[in-house]
Image (tube, coloured by chain):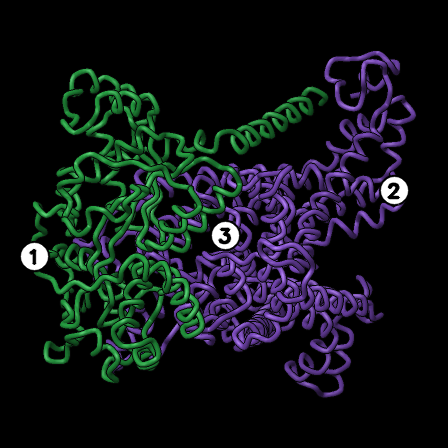
Chain colours: A purple, B green
């Protein structure tokens, strides 16, 4: 490194192409400005078109409020908004009921198998919720569901008790995959609560549980509430499993209605208007959450001052372990068993025995079915592309913001985070409109999906890169600058090597998020650009569950292989919640 | 260190390029290996092509007398055919593709099957975006075809072998913008273990009775052309409000594709389904406990049109494919899967012949006029 930096400014060494023209002029500023331009277009264009189209009518010129009037006066759409709110509050409440006790037991107590529980949590966090939804269709369909069949075998009767095709069923299925949000927020807050206050309570005669309820939980109350909000927003924006479960239940929700407006005959304008309530609710709640988290800085919860002790739960530790295992059974063990079982059965409705065993469905989805094998390639390609773009833009913007390279860089930091406020399906509407018209016709190519994933997950890439830059002392860079490197060169030779580990982590994070992304892809794919989530969704509607299960298992193996690799390379914290 | 970084940046740039090329380039280019719908799936595409080319020289005589040799030659030069369709299911579509490629070696086949609303939406979106991907479009909702014709988006072609088609379905469009490609009888299917023989419904009208509450399944009249056509027939027979308010009270399970309803009665999730005859019979033949009832108030036959898209990238292959749909091979192939052939000379084992059925089919102009309205009413009443 040193010898290259020592070369006199102006001489072009091999490999010095970036950041330098032959004349030796430093064109780094042009690069930074280009990056800012890319960011503004990426974020601004879809939002602009979304807004414009929401005020226009199909095939007519002029500005109108008609779409909004339709949305807010049609009983069905109002019902959909109400149902979405019910679904979101229900599953967020469930995620608090699961996430908070689990976080407390894992962080503060001597419950056994705490390490394993953390791993299972990571697994639940990376499992695509719609795969869980599909598995639960097989487990708890009112008549053919496996659990209902077991129930009838054991207890007899006419009908099993479980019906996944209901609002309650959807709340359950969404809730058991969104508790990791609450868990992550609450557990990190619990890490900082010192035991001194708890000790004081106990000296004054309070029992362990009384202490927890009266002292510990109130201290982390803001993080519980903000966990609730995150889980709420996640459920509100979710498309896959609610749609699969609630269409047969005849319960309209916002995301399903928006998707239907993209079916024939399409009404993109109405969909744009209908996206606005979703956007506003999300923006308001995220703002609220920020306010709440800002308050977390009570003096009692700051830093490492106090000591932290592990609580001895006595026999109760087995109760908590049982609880955690039960949750994992619902979110992981049962669904995975069901998917694997179905994927290996000739016909999933028949008993699981020797004569019904087959590997044909794996052969089928991997090699025979034209669109499944294509979708696997597409998924890998688009996700890798998006992860690369997102990290590239993310790291550039993070660098500009952190090193204050241009005026108004704080605004950039704000702009880059905007997709967090926008549910996936809303981003997809904006992107669909923006890139299916001249001059940028990307619809029908894989590029529109790559752009969509990049836009959607740029905040994660950005905050990941930003965290890393904050941890590096600018003095190292200044040294290189003093020795004659221009800015881009410095970044390339000094900064990037220092942050490599974080970059890999960020890349993998975006990659995984993109692989499991459905709500964006469902509006943007065309026949040759199908991805695994969209194919799975379509195949469920066809009722070919064995194929769905086989492709689902392939997808899970893929995701877990990548997560496992990252876990080995980077340690367990690489996927710590970037949204908080 | 410097070298390492250079290596990484080169790899990065390469990845960018690959992603770009693959994504922006001819969308079909990326799909080549995966979408060849042949039996020899594990072999890579180039290998298949070579064998296919070799086969041409020896088996070139396989083309039927009806085909114009110049057309066959032109089609082979194009080398590919892309079909979007709503008929049957993906498996049968794959088989049709395999048979077509076997008959005309050197023409690769890509077939996608989905519900009418979804695939038509994709088709029109791609047309608007100027993407020329699809050659031939087949649907179960004839109003879509009429709309495409009105917009001038179909290529007129009078396929060879039309004289073999059952007379009443031979000329769906006098201007030859589209042809009949499939006939899909809709019947009441049921699971023999879930319902007693004496309780079985005998007619569509019976399905509105309270004893079938929570027992029925079908697709969405808004998404599926087949269910939509059935709903229109019921409206014509009994009136929308009279029939569907009572039907709704029985709380049927409504998915999207009508094919899902077949899965529902096979698995026993529901006892009765409004389903395509062919798929019930196929499932029965596999040993599943299902059977079909021909409703006494008429079997709804969905007359399914097929046409060539105006900007078809492979027009000659498209014409050849339309000829193929009139051939005996095609009729025998679909009959093997218990689907109703469009020719009168092939029968389906275990199924009543079309001429013996009490056929109910709304007229195309009625479908064109009323189906969009049915879709709206269906969404209002059932949600999706």
Classify B307 as above or below A76.
Answer: above
The numbered dot on residue B242 is none
**Residue under numbered circle 2:** A404
Q: Residue at x 21, y 73 (%)?
A: B204
Give the side of residue A62 with respect to residue B26, left or right.
right
> As rendered, which of A262 and B39 lies closer to the eye?
A262
Residue density around tag 2, few if under 14, some if 14–19, many if 20 or more, within 10 Å: few
Q: Label 1, on which residue? A: B350
* Residue A559 spot, x, y in % from top left: 49, 47
Tell which subunit mark 2 falls on. A
Q: Are marks 1 and 3 in contact (CB under 8 Å)?
A: no
Mark 2 touches mark 3? (CB < 8 Å): no
Secondary structure under tag 3 reads helix
Which residue is located at x 26 percent, y 44 percent? B179
Residue A152 is situated, as x and y percent measured from the top left of the image, at 26, 77
Q: Visible in this render: residue A97? A: no
Tell me the CA gap for discs 1 and 2: 78 Å
In terms of sequence position, does the residue under pointer 2 or pointer 3 come before the other? 2
Label 1 lies in what chain?
B
Pinpoint residue B140: horizontal percent, then vertical percent. Answer: 30, 54
């Amino acid at each position: 490194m040193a010898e290259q930096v020592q070369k006199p400014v102006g001489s072009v060494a091999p490999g010095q192409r970036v950041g330098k023209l032959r004349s030796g002029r430093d064109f780094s500023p042009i690069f930074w400005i280009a990056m800012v331009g890319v960011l503004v277009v990426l974020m601004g264009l879809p939002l602009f078109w979304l807004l414009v189209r929401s005020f226009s009518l199909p095939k007519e010129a002029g500005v109108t409020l008609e779409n909004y009037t339709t949305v807010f006066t049609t009983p069905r759409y109002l019902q959909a908004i109400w149902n979405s709110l019910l679904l979101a509050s229900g599953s967020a409440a469930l995620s608090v009921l699961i996430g908070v006790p689990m976080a407390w037991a894992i962080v503060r107590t001597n419950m056994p198998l705490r390490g394993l529980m953390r791993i299972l949590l990571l697994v639940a966090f990376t499992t695509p919720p719609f795969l869980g939804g599909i598995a639960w269709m097989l487990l708890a369909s009112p008549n053919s569901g496996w659990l209902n069949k077991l129930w009838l075998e054991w207890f007899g009767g006419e009908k099993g008790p479980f019906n996944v095709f209901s609002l309650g069923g959807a709340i359950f299925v969404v809730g058991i995959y969104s508790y990791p949000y609450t868990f992550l927020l609450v557990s990190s807050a619990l890490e900082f609560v010192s035991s001194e206050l708890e000790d004081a309570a106990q000296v004054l005669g309070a029992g362990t549980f009384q202490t927890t309820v009266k002292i510990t939980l109130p201290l982390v109350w803001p993080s519980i509430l903000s966990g609730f909000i995150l889980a709420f927003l996640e459920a509100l924006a979710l498309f896959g499993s609610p749609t699969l479960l609630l269409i047969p239940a005849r319960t309209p929700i916002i995301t399903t209605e928006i998707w239907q407006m993209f079916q024939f005959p399409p009404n993109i304008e109405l969909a744009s208007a209908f996206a606005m309530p979703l956007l506003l609710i999300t923006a308001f709640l995220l703002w609220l959450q920020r306010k709440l988290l800002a308050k977390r800085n009570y003096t009692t919860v700051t830093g490492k001052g106090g000591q932290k002790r592990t609580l001895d739960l006595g026999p109760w530790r087995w109760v908590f372990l049982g609880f955690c295992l039960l949750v994992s059974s619902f979110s992981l063990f049962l669904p995975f068993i069901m998917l694997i079982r179905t994927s290996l059965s000739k016909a999933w409705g028949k008993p699981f025995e020797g004569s019904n065993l087959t590997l044909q469905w794996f052969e089928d989805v991997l090699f025979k079915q034209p669109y499944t094998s294509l979708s696997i390639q597409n998924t890998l390609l688009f996700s890798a592309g998006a992860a690369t773009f997102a990290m590239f833009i993310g790291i550039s913007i993070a660098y500009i913001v952190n090193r204050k390279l241009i005026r108004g860089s704080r605004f950039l930091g704000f702009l880059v985070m905007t997709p967090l406020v926008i549910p996936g399906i809303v981003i997809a509407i904006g992107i669909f409109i923006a890139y299916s018209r001249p001059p940028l016709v990307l619809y029908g190519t894989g590029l529109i999906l790559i752009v969509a994933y990049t836009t959607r997950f740029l905040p994660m890439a950005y905050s990941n890169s930003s965290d890393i830059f904050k941890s590096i002392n600018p003095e190292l860079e200044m040294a290189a600058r003093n020795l004659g490197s221009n800015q881009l060169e410095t970044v390339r030779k000094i900064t990037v090597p220092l942050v490599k580990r974080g970059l890999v982590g960020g890349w993998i994070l975006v990659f995984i998020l993109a692989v499991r992304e459905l709500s964006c892809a469902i509006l943007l794919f065309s026949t040759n650009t199908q991805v695994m989530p969209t194919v799975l969704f379509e195949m469920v509607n066809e009722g070919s569950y064995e194929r769905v299960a086989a492709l689902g298992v392939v997808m899970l193996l893929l995701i877990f292989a990548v997560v496992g690799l990252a876990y080995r390379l980077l340690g367990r914290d690489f996927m710590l919640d970037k949204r908080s | 260190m410097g070298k390492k970084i250079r290596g990484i940046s080169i790899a990065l740039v390469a990845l960018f390029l690959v992603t770009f090329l693959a994504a922006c380039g001819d969308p079909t280019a990326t799909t080549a290996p995966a979408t060849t719908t042949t039996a020899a799936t594990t072999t890579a595409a180039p290998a298949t092509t070579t064998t296919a080319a070799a086969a041409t020289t020896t088996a070139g005589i396989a083309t039927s007398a009806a085909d114009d040799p110049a057309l066959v030659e032109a089609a082979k030069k194009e080398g590919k055919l892309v079909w979007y369709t709503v008929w049957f299911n993906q498996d049968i579509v794959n088989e049709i593709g395999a048979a077509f490629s076997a008959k005309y070696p050197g023409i690769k086949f890509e077939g996608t099957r989905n519900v009418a609303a979804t695939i038509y939406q994709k088709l029109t979106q791609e047309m608007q975006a100027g993407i020329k991907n699809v050659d031939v479009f087949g649907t179960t909702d004839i109003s879509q075809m009429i709309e495409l014709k009105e917009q001038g988006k179909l290529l007129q072609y009078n396929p060879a072998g039309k004289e073999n088609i059952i007379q009443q379905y031979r000329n769906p469009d006098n201007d030859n913008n589209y042809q009949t490609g499939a006939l899909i009888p809709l019947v009441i299917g049921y699971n023999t273990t879930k319902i007693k023989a004496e309780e079985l419904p005998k007619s569509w009208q019976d399905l509105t009775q309270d004893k079938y509450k929570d027992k029925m399944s079908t697709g969405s009249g808004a998404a599926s052309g087949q269910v939509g056509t059935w709903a229109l027939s019921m409206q014509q027979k009994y009136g929308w409000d009279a029939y569907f308010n009572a039907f709704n009270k029985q709380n049927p399970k409504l998915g999207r594709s009508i094919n899902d309803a077949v899965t529902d009665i096979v698995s026993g999730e529901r006892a009765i389904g409004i389903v395509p005859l062919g798929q019930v019979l196929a499932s029965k033949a596999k040993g599943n406990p299902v059977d079909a009832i021909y409703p006494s108030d008429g079997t709804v036959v969905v007359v399914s049109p097929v046409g060539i898209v105006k900007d078809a990238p492979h027009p000659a292959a498209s014409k050849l494919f339309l000829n193929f749909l009139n051939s005996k091979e095609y009729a025998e192939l679909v009959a093997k899967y218990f689907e109703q052939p469009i020719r009168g000379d092939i029968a389906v084992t275990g199924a009543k012949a079309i001429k013996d059925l009490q056929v109910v089919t709304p007229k195309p102009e009625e479908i064109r006029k009323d189906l969009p309205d049915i879709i709206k009413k269906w969404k209002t009443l059932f949600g999706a």
